[in-house]
Every structure is written in C-alpha cells, then in structure tokens.
Amino acid sequence: MPLSSKEVERIARLARLHLSSSEVERFSRELAAIVDYMSRLEAVETGGIEPESQATTLGDVFREDEVRPSLTRNQALGNAPQTDGEYFLVPRVVG
C-alpha cells in the first residue's frame, strides 16, 4: 500500500521532522514497505495461540542479597576531595 507524499509530510510534521523532497520520496517507499509487512502479519492465523506477557523464559539473573564486609564510612570518604565528615560534598547543580 503506497503512501502519498502528503501522508508522509503529515507524519513528519507530527514527529516534528523537516524532510526534503528526496527524503519524502524515500520515506514514502520505506513506510509503505513497513505497512505492507504489518498487513502480512495481520494475515497470520493466531487463533489457537495463547497470549504471552513475556517473550522469553529468563528468570531473575541477579545474585542473592547477602551481608558482606564493606568499607567503613571513613574509608569511603578517605579519597573524596571534599567531605563534611559524614557525606561527600559536591558542587550544587540545581539553582
């Protein structure tokens, strides 16, 4: 299903894109190919297929939380350029 240049220009305007005439022609062909592919997907019989909420069967890949030895506050603040003894001091970034 070919898209007219008016349709492509309207889509570009909605996306806040400024396209040249050669880009309009190119995107007209490319968008038409996408729409054609989507219409081919609509023709696939999916009546007996159960919907899935997730495409993969991967589970949680994170490690278990466990208490381990870590830095003390003084060790963590030791190499910081500025601290107040308890926290890192950083330049203000929001006025």
Image (cartoon, rainbow, N blue to C red):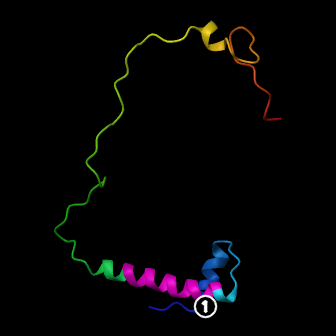
Locate residue 22 relative to residue 52 in the image: left or right: right
In the image, residue 37 sits, relative to residue 59, either above or below, namely below
Where residue 90 sits, quadrant-wise, is top right
Magenta stretch encompasses residue 37: yes
Q: Amino acid at mark 1?
A: Ser
Percent position (x, y) of residue 87? Answer: 69, 15
The kind of secondary structure element at disc 1 is helix
In the image, residue 85 sits, relative to residue 39, either above or below, namely above
Q: Residue at the far front: name it.
A: 79
Give the magenta part as a residue range.
Answer: 23-38
In the image, residue 45 sits, relative to residue 54, either above or below, namely below
Of residues 71 and 95, the one nearer the viewer is: 71
Query: Residue at label 1?
Result: 5
What main secondary structure does the magenta stretch of the protein show?
Answer: helix
Percent position (x, y) of residue 66? Answer: 37, 17
Residue at (40, 85) in percent of width and height: 36
Magenta stretch encompasses residue 22: no
